[in-house]
Image (tube, rainbow, N blue to C red):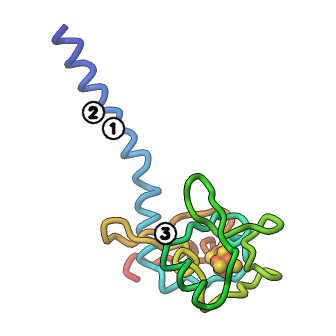
Amino acid sequence: MLEFIDFIIKATIYSAVLAFLILLPNLVLNVLMGLNESRFKCMQCGNCCRLKIIHLTKEDVVRLEKAGYADFTEMKGGEVTFRRVNGRCLFNKDDNCSVYEHRARVCREFPFFTIYGIPYCRIMSYCPAQDELRKNLKWIP
Ligand code: SF4
Ligand code: SF4
């Protein structure tokens, strides 16, 4: 019985190490792109307004309400998001943001975030600006 438990523990540890090693190249790329944020040039293609569900903070909602906007939210998976019209954020007009000054925090930050203080780029295949950033990455930004 003890041998079996020992085997399970070792198998779990080896699996975790293997999974980490498989994920490591992507994690390094995520962080390296995060460190190169200043080189990122949004192409304003509007894909994130169409393809991404935008989660809103309370501050986002208050800011937009103070600016005079109403009826712009809906619930998705228990979270407040921008209402979507024709498959895109209701504020997206001809691929331009009509509330740019008041847009949500995630709209300002995307695709860059921090995890435990570490800069991080969330890689999304629909973002052409990330393809350009990948070509111009510098180890020392
Ligand atoms: S608020 Fe503006 S930037 Fe954010 S999803 Fe809507 S249209 Fe896009
Ligand atoms: S998908 Fe990328 S390039 Fe397109 S608008 Fe969003 S951040 Fe900018």
Of labels 3 and 1, earlier in sequence is: 1
Q: Percent from the top left, x then y, of residue 62?
A: 53, 81
| Disc 1 residue type (three-letter) | Ala
Bin the neighbour count of mark 3 within 10 Å (Cα to Cα): few under 14, some 14-19, many 20 and up: many
Is 67 placed above or below 119 here?
below
Front-most of residues 101 and 13: 101
Q: Tell me the number on the disc at residue 84.
A: none
Is 65 placed above or below 78 here?
below
Instruction: Give the labeled residue for mark 1.
Output: 16
Residue 48: quarter of image? bottom right
Q: Percent from the top left, x then y, of residue 111?
A: 54, 72
Q: Residue at x 32, y 40 (%)?
A: 17
Q: Is mark 3 within 8 Å of ligand 2?
A: no
Residue 2 can be seen in this image? yes
Q: Tell me the number on the disc at residue 13.
A: 2
Instruction: Give the labeled residue for mark 3.
Output: 121
Q: Secondary structure at mark 2?
A: helix
**Contact flag, marks 3 and 1 (Cβ < 8 Å):** no
Q: Residue at x 27, y 33 (%)?
A: 13
Rendered-image quarter of ligand 2:
bottom right
| Disc 2 residue type (three-letter) | Ile
Quadrant location of the C terminus in the rendered image: bottom left
Is 6 placed above or below 61 here?
above
In the orientation shown, which residue stands out farthest toward the top?
1
Q: How many marks?
A: 3
Q: Locate residue 16 relative to residue 5 in the image: left or right.
A: right
Q: Percent from the top left, x then y, of residue 44?
A: 70, 82
